[in-house]
Amino acid sequence: MADPQSPDARLAALRDRLDHAAGLAGRAPGAVTLIAVSKTIAPEAITPLIAAGQRVFGENRVQEAQAKWPALREATPDCRLHLVGQLQSNKADEAVRLFDAIHAVDRPSLVAALARAMDKAGRRPDCFVQVNIGEEPQKGGVALADLPALLAEARAAALPVIGLMAVPPADREPAPYFALLAKLARDHGLAGLSMGMSGDFETAALLGATHVRIGTALFGARG
């Protein structure tokens, strides 16, 4: 009998829960991409998930990803890497070279830096614009009122914006915030919704998430 705490068992259980939640909304199995957030996780703890079939991973920091992912991807070239943390404009070149998707486009200076980096590298990772959905001063993300202008700038700069990303307030019911993000995406003609983490990914899947970012539920609590 499989150990329920083994990486492959945790992964299978999470995929089942994700597909069930999506199915309740009439969505097909596999409609939601599970991003395994491997920040602070050593390569030897990541490889069992790769062996179990997981191919999409998320990191918060460019420098940490640079240190561990080139070797992991050399061994498994079809892994895709998403930057799910804040990005400093001076790290845009490295981020564009390393990541397949960037989830934290949130200000005009970063749009400009990413556009320059993409032109230089000849590589155009998918982009999500991060929205400060709960209007929290301590969080990243573009203000709701500034979203249309930022999207217009990103599109004018030829960034491949595929969707929106948000993290709802930790102490409130997330469903209204997920629903608002989904409405904003529809209003702006965007199909991608990066929303939902270990504690609320099923709610996010019910409300249209295309990508969920799951770390703790896969790897356990970080020290």
Image (spheres, grey):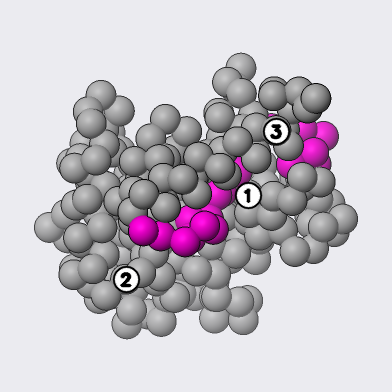
At horizontal 80% and vertical 38% (from top left) the residue drawn is 48
Q: Quadrant of the N terminus?
A: top right
State whether residue 150 appears in this view. Answer: no
Query: What residue is shown at x 40% (from left), y 70% (from top)?
Result: 162
Q: Position of residue 61 (x, y in %)?
A: 57, 44
Type of amino acid at the residue the image marks with label 1: Phe
Please provide the residue range marked out in magenta: 26-49
Secondary element type, mark 2: loop
Q: Which residue is mark 1?
A: 57
Which quadrant would residue 70 be assigned to in this image?
bottom right
User: Element at badge 1?
Assistant: strand
- Marks 2 and 3 in Cβ contact (< 8 Å): no
For residue 28: magenta?
yes
Position of 76 relative to 222 (above/below): below
Q: Residue furthest left?
A: 145
- The amino acid on which the numbered mark 3 sits, given as a three-letter code, is Ala
Q: Nearer the viewer, residue 83 or 53?
A: 53
Q: Identify which amino acid the numbered label 2 is placed on.
A: Leu
The residue that label 3 is drawn on is 9
What secondary structure is found at the residue carrying circle 3?
helix
Residue at 74% across, 41% down: 49
User: Marks 3 and 1: which is nearer the front?
Assistant: 3
Judge whether 79 appears above or below 60 on screen: below
The circle drawn on residue 190 is 2
